[in-house]
Amino acid sequence: MIELIAHITDPHLDEAFPFKKQKVPRKRLYNILEDIEKKKCSRIVCTGDIGENTALPCFFSRLEGTSFFLTPGNHDQYVAVASYYTRGIVPTSEKIYTSTQNNTYKTIYLDSSASVIDDEQLHWLANELLTSLPVVIFMHHPVLGLEGAVDKIGHLQNREAVVAILTKTTSQVTIFCGHYHMDDCRQYKNITQYITPAIAYQIKTNPDAITVDTTVSGYRMIYIEEGKISSTVTLFHYAD
């Protein structure tokens, strides 16, 4: 039996940049969630950057009744988000991270909202990786770097430490992340990383400058069957 997981990321709801009409990302979120609803997923995972705090009631009410997991992004504020979402909250460090497991794979949800995986979370991650099962990780920031201006200014600050922990496990590790507003897949040792297109807008791969494309919105559908993982991206095209 194939399990379907919808991965959404970077809605950036109600933010002033880059749209003149701040409600545009809301409409794109609604379109994507309507498409997801047709596919009968087992869960929806958002890897952060929900948007302005004014949009949080709308965002969480729209996902009410679904099996929903969140990993915060650098635009998300713990205090504001934790009043709506309580799964995996760690009040002492003001982070949100947790894990789940079934008979065929383990899922880890990390909090990189401070653009770093702190020492407490790194220690927790190392213990969570003591498994022989394939591991699926959801987080906001990519761990494996790529060429482009967006990676130079927005990368996870201690990604080398995270990679070192991930490559010590004998398990295959598949990362689904966002933050860079593009579709990308790359591998390093036992790690396969997928960056999922943003709901709000995309960023073109450019070594010298960040170029925004407001005409495309998207999400990823993940398929898991007996521990084997694959995925497809769905894109929506708009005039602006």
Image (cartoon, helix red, strand yellow):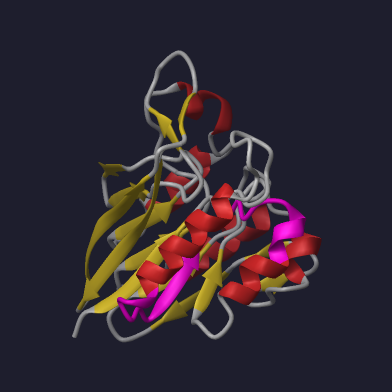
Direction from residue 222 to residue 210 in the image, left or right: right
Query: Can see residue 93?
Result: no
Q: Quadrant of the N terminus?
A: bottom left
Magenta range: 37-56
Inspect this view and state whether residue 216 appears.
yes
Residue extending farthest top = 208
Residue depicted at x 48% and y 38%: 160
Q: Is residue 95 left or right of residue 205?
A: right
> Is residue 23 shown left or right of residue 37?
right
Q: Residue at coordinates 39% horizontally, 55% vertically from top-left? A: 176
Query: In front: 13, or 150?
Result: 13
- Compared with 58, 11 (above or below) is above
Whole-percent x and y of residue 183?
A: 33, 43
Tell me the residue at 67%/44% (across/down).
15
Asked where in the image residue 164 lies, by quadrant, the reply is: top left
Give x and y (percent) for residue 95.
Answer: 70, 62
Identify the residue at image location x=47%, y=51%: 199
Instruction: Where is residue 215? Give x, y as percent.
Output: 41, 38
